[in-house]
């Protein structure tokens, strides 16, 4: 089991470690007072990466090598200049119901993932406004993936909770590092099998109830809130979608809606590292409300591929509780038994038995954006 948690919050990055007596205790704080939107512990060499969204001062990326105390600044993804004709079109009056044209500038670094085990130094970054970037040198430089950015379908992508679309999920196939899947709010699921040279939308079976019936199955307007891949069985993927849970057993080529589950809406999903049938969710009430269903914070778990669910709340706040769990706020470690969860109201909990019971680590952190085992 992994004994270290990395918790990215609105007011800093917190390191929390399990003590010999079983308690989880805060051991270090980094970037105190600054919003940390994403954290990554590279499993290949132990390097830590922290992305900060400093508003007026822009997006920053920092790196700390294993065994070191000092952080060093990395490059951040930079968009190329926008073609003049597109810039003019973006500033022209448009239909108020049409998607807002995305700027060619970095608004937020939303997700960081390591490349494959055979790709030392390779990192992938998903951003708002919907750009996918690749680094081959541990964040010293970045390149926009133009084959995805230049897809004509991107003109229809639109923002979900943010003004612009964003890439929040990146899954690198452990069998083949050139096979990469990304999920976009709102722009569907896209896959490359040649390292990003070409892309295909793969959302067959997904359905968006917020669209007119004739467009509900359009790949380009699906809103997968978060997508995860089972490391031991990479053909098994789970998505918490705006309109329910979807599962793929063929590497994302097709998707099946999970009927009858408790999570008709939510953001977070985690999959067991070895058992593709087991996944966890944090159900919520959709759209304008965005709070736990009936004011009851719970975690739901399936162990049979979505045919049935158990709902757990032991150790979680007593209702009414309005903690919301963001996309990156639920994590499972390599054992598949230990989970961690952080909320928008600063709660942090750990479960040692697959989500059946939870222990509160802190009730007073800043709002949590991302939880990861180090």
Image (cartoon, rainbow, N blue to C red):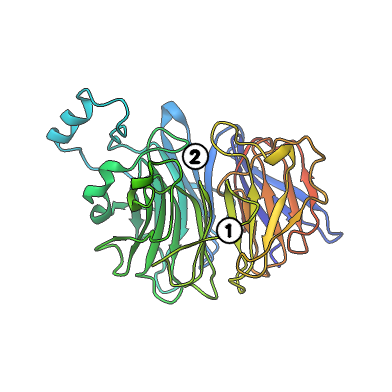
Quarter of image, res 43 = bottom right
Tell me the SS state at disc 2: strand
Point out which mark residue 52 bears: 2
Query: Residue 271 location, x and y as percent?
Result: 60, 64
Query: Residue 105 location, x and y as percent?
Result: 31, 37
Specify whether 124 is left or right of 11. Answer: left
Specify whether 180 is left or right of 293. Answer: left
Point out which mark residue 25 bears: none
Q: Residue at x 78, y 34 (%)?
A: 320
Direction left: furthest residue:
85
Quarter of the rendering occupied by the N terminus: bottom right
Direction front: furthest residue:
213
Q: Residue at x 78, y 59 (%)?
A: 356
Direction right: furthest residue:
21
Query: Residue at label 1?
Result: 259
Quarter of the rendering occupied by the C terminus: bottom right
Query: Residue 353 location, x and y as percent?
Result: 78, 64
Placement of 343 over or under 140, stated as above or below:
above
Give the camera-side residue of 127 and 222. Answer: 222
Discs 1/2, front:
1
- Sequence-first disc among 1 and 2: 2
Give the camera-side residue of 343 and 292. Answer: 292
Specify whether 28 is left or right of 122. Answer: right
């Amino acid at each position: 089991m992994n004994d270290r948690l990395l918790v990215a919050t609105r007011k800093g990055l917190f390191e929390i470690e399990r003590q010999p007596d079983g308690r989880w205790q805060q051991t270090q704080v980094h970037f105190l007072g600054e919003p940390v939107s994403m954290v990554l512990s590279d499993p290949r060499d132990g390097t830590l990466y922290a992305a900060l969204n400093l508003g007026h001062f822009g997006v920053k990326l920092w790196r700390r090598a294993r065994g070191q105390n000092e952080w060093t600044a990395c490059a951040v993804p930079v968009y190329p200049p926008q073609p003049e004709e597109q810039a003019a079109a973006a500033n022209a009056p448009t239909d108020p119901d049409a998607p807002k044209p995305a700027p060619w500038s970095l608004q937020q670094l939303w997700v960081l993932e390591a490349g494959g085990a055979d790709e030392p130094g390779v990192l992938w970054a998903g951003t708002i406004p919907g750009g996918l970037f690749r680094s081959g040198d541990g964040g010293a430089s970045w390149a926009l993936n133009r084959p995805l950015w230049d897809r004509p379908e991107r003109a229809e992508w639109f923002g979900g909770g943010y003004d612009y679309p964003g890439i929040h999920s990146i899954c690198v196939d452990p069998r083949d590092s050139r096979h990469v899947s990304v999920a976009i709010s709102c722009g569907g699921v896209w896959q490359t099998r040649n390292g990003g040279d070409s892309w295909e939308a793969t959302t067959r079976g997904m359905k968006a109830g917020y669209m007119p019936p004739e467009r509900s199955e359009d790949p380009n307007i699906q809103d997968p809130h978060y997508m995860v891949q089972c490391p031991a069985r990479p053909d098994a993927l789970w998505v918490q979608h705006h309109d329910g849970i979807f599962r793929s057993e063929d590497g994302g080529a097709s998707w099946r809606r999970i009927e009858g589950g408790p999570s008709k809406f939510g953001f977070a999903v985690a999959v067991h590292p070895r058992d593709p049938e087991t996944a966890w969710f944090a159900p919520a009430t959709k759209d304008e409300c965005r709070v736990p269903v009936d004011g009851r914070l719970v975690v739901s778990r399936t162990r049979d591929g979505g045919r049935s669910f158990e709902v757990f709340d032991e150790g979680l706040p007593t209702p009414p509780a309005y903690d919301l769990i963001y996309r990156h706020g639920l994590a499972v470690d390599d054992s598949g038994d230990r989970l961690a969860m952080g909320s928008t109201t600063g709660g942090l909990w750990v479960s040692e038995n697959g989500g059946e019971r939870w222990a509160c680590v802190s009730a007073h952190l800043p709002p949590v954006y991302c939880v990861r085992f180090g």
